[in-house]
Image (spheres, rainbow, N blue to C red):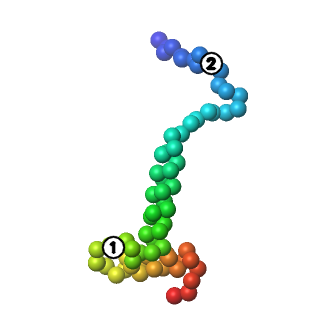
């Protein structure tokens, strides 16, 4: 026995898919990205727990690579 197929009651729009996102669907990821980028670029403001100095060195290397500065 075959399953019935469902068809759309209206044809698809000719211009493509019409999708509307709420404002926060764009704003929240953009704000989160900006905050994380600022924390990476200035790790002193992150107030991370003291621990392995390799993490700080890694963040310094990433910062130097992003800013293209000499050590």
Tag of residue 26: none
* Helix, strand or loop status at disc 1: loop
| Image-quadrant location for residue 54 | bottom left
Tag of residue 47: 1
* Helix, strand or loop status at disc 2: loop
Q: Front-most of 30 and 12?
A: 30
- Which residue occupies 48% across, 73% down? 41
Rendered view: 30 above or below 17: below
Q: Of marks 1 and 2, which one's residue comes earlier in the chain?
A: 2
Q: Front-most of 11 and 48?
A: 48
- Which residue occupies 48% across, 57% down? 31
Query: Is disc 2 surrounded by few (<14), some (14 to 19) or many (20+) residues within 10 Å?
Result: few
Rendered view: 4 above or below 71: above
The residue where tag 2 is placed is 10
How far apart are the alpha carbons under marks 1 and 2? 56 Å
- Which residue occupies 55% across, 74% down? 66
Rendered view: 1 above or below 26: above
Measured as percent of width and height from the top left, residue 70 is found at 56, 87
Task: Give the residue at the far top of this rendering.
Answer: 1
């Amino acid at each position: 026995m075959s399953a019935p197929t469902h068809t759309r009651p209206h044809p698809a729009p000719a211009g493509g898919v019409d999708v509307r996102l709420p404002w926060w669907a764009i704003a929240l990821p953009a704000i989160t990205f900006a905050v994380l980028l600022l924390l990476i670029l200035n790790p002193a403001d992150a107030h991370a727990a003291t621990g392995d100095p390799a993490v700080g060195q890694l963040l310094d290397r990433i910062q130097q690579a992003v800013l293209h500065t000499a050590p």
